[in-house]
Image: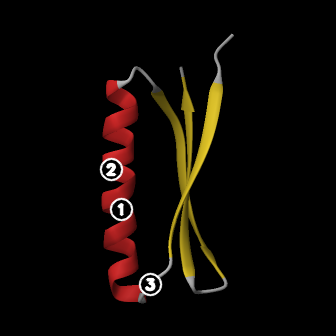
Amino acid sequence: MKKHEVHILKKGASFGSMKEELAKEVEQFLNKKVNEGYEVVDISFTYYEASELIAFVTLSR
């Protein structure tokens, strides 16, 4: 059976830069985890009260 991990990355900033900053942070995080042998299961994004953009990343080993 595979082990799964869920990671939450969030960015609270001005709306214009928030998307690009979080996308870059998620990209760097995924590159690191894939190089460590993890497999990406799912990635989803949501807004929280219009002040934070949140990424939920599910990985398996």
Residue that protrudes farthest toward the top in the picture:
1
Secondary structure under tag 3 reads loop
First-in-chain label (1 vs 3) = 3
Decide: is 10 above or below 56: below
| Res 27 label | 2
What amino acid is at disc 3?
Answer: Ala
What amino acid is at disc 2?
Answer: Glu
Q: Residue at x 40, y 78 (%)?
A: 18
Mark 2 packing: few (<14 Cα in 10 Å), some, or many (20+)? few
Q: How far apart, in angstroms, are the residues tagged by discs 1 and 2?
A: 6 Å
Tags 2 and 3 in contact by the CB under 8 Å rule?
no
Secondary structure under tag 2 reads helix
Name the residue tied to disc 1.
23
Query: Which residue occupies the foreground of this view, 11 or 2?
Result: 11
Decide: is 25 above or below 16: above
Q: How far across and how far down the image is residue 34, in percent?
A: 36, 29
Q: Residue at x 33, y 70 (%)?
A: 21
- Quadrant housing residue 35: top left
| Res 13 label | 3
Tags 1 and 2 in contact by the CB under 8 Å rule?
yes
Q: How far across and how far down the image is residue 45, in percent?
A: 54, 62
Q: Nearer the viewer, mark 2 or mark 3?
A: 3
First-in-chain label (2 vs 3) = 3
Give the quadrant of the N terminus: top right
Q: How far across and how far down the image is residue 60, in percent?
A: 56, 25
In the rendered structure, the answer to whether residue 14 lies left or right of residue 43 reads left
